[in-house]
Amino acid sequence: MALTIVVLAPAEAGKEDGGELSLTLDAPRIIIGRAEGCEVRLPDTSVSHRHASIRQRGATYLLLDEGSDNGTYLGKTRIAPRTAMPLRSGDRIRVGRVWLTLRIEPAVARAAPAAAAKELALELVARGLAAQGEDPAPRVVVVDGPDRGRALRLDASGRPYILGRAKDTDLVLDDPDVSRRHLAITRRGDQFSVQDLGSRTGALLDGAQVPQFDTIWRPGQVLALSGDRLMFEHPAAEALAEIERSPCEPLRPDAVFDPPSPEPPPAPSTPTPSPASTSTLSPLARPPVSVRQAAPQGGGWGFMEALIALLALGVLALSIAGLMWLLGRG
């Protein structure tokens, strides 16, 4: 039996871009946290770098808190640190403010769990950025030269994108010294590579000749094709790195975190005030889970306050009457 961990993200966090966010794993220990080495990487500053773990004991799965800052919850019950709690299929757990649901079922685990964990983290950040109105897509931009300002989105991972003067290339360049099919760029996750396609003038990567086989294109390096200078951008990867570097964000003790509904609620007929929410993915992205902060009630007197005020006025009136009676006798 394998364990499938599903991240419960709200509909507004880019759900239309692609289904369930989940990982299927079959390992004796699964670490949940924000750090790069975790099997389940959750890009949320309320999640500790090493937050919780799930241990397999025969056919049983056990949940442990790994000394996290904001606690691990099985349903609404907080787990004491280093205490094991048995899990059942369908259980919901909360780490920081992120809700997860578990399925214990016959399933095929991913062959490369580290790559799958990073892919999940990048997708969470990308959906958050998209919900905030930012374009999370990785892209190559011509920063200088005759084709300055042109850009190419690299949405598909593993697919070579061709640059050149030919009209059927993915990024058409007008520089006359560029070959018809000059160079290929491939993205795999957050890694970029370049390959010369036998061009007449070649290409330079930070001054070094690009060979006719895949060569890693590192962040900050400038790719030169004749007079054009290109750089790549990956907003989701940059945001993920920033979130993972950040210190853990302490949560308010009175904060209430409700798990997202399976289906979005119908739109109200009249506008209603929305509950306050806190940032989940740093200032760069929208949170993957909904948050409601408990707030003190607004002004106005309740029944008890009015009753106490009336009693106080009655006591004051009796005191004044008694004082007048004493003065009258004197």
Image (cartoon, rainbow, N blue to C red):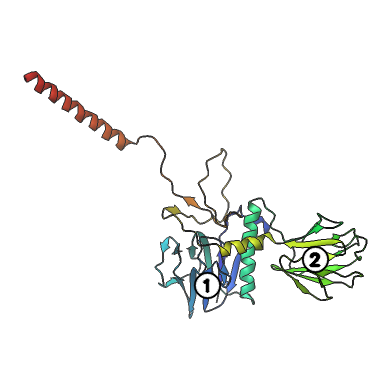
Q: Residue at x 50, y 47 (%)?
A: 276
Mark 2 crowd level (few <14, some 14–19, many ≥20, 10 Å Cα): many
Q: Which of 192/121 is in front?
A: 192
Q: Nearer the viewer, mark 1 or mark 2?
A: 2
Quadrant in which the C terminus is drawn: top left
Residues at badges 1 and 2 in contact (C-beta under 8 Å)? no
Q: Position of residue 30 (x, y in %)?
A: 53, 74
Find residue 180 and name its label. Answer: none
Q: Position of residue 12 (x, y in %)?
A: 61, 52
Q: Position of residue 24 (x, y in %)?
A: 59, 72
**Badge 1 is on which residue?**
31
Q: Residue at x 59, y 69 (%)?
A: 23
Q: Which of 191/306 is in front?
A: 191
Q: Secondary structure at mark 1?
A: strand
Kind of residue at badge 2: Leu
Q: Which of 191/128 is in front?
A: 191
The quadrant holding residue 112 is bottom right
**Badge 2 is on which residue?**
223
